[in-house]
Amino acid sequence: MAGRADVVVGMPVYGTDGQLLGEVAAADDEALTVETTRVPWPMVGRIGGWAIHLRAATLAAAARSEAPQQDKQIVVPVVEERLSVGTREVDLGAIEIRERVVEETAMQPVTVRREVVGVVRRDAEGHEVGTQEITPPGAAPQP
């Protein structure tokens, strides 16, 4: 693994997210200068493969960070994210619906029921006088 002595002007510098942040403009015992921003050496994560990788995603974050020293507290900024969710109407086009009625004649076997009432007339002595079959009013054949 390379060290500070291997840092050369023009080396690319990358953030923690892999994005190119710039090139080395200068290097001294206290800091590395990327473009016009001074980055303290403790913010350098790795030097090697002809590239420098920082411990911060942006140059601004690396420049304002101080190197942690023994018995010194590190202040971590709290970041708050808020998400606002809503709905809106969007024109997605149109739909055309067509209905077509097709009439077909089909021959199907169907069992039909009908109601027939048989009336038997008897005289006073109980003799059959006559019979008659009638269909009640409103009674139609039912399947």
Image (cartoon, helix red, strand yellow):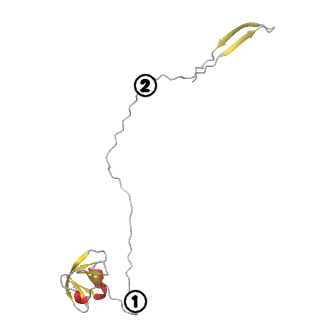
Which amino acid type corresponds to the residue marked 1 in the rendered image? Gln
The circle on residue 73 is 1
**In which image quadrant can residue 31 be found?**
bottom left
Q: Position of residue 97 (x, y in %)?
A: 36, 38
Residue 67 occupies quadrant: bottom left
Determine which residue is flagged by label 2.
104
Q: Quadrant of the C terminus?
A: top right
Q: Residue at x 64, y 17 (%)?
A: 116
Foreground of the two, 128 or 14: 14
- Badge 2 marks a residue whose secondary structure is loop
Dot 1, crowdedness within 10 Å: few (<14), some or many (≥20)?
few
60 or 26: which is nearer to us? 26
Q: Residue at x 40, y 28 (%)?
A: 102
> Eyeballing the image, is 92 above or below 39?
above
Instruction: Give residue 42's position: percent from left, percent from top.
Output: 31, 87
Which residue occupies the foreground of this view, 27 or 124? 27
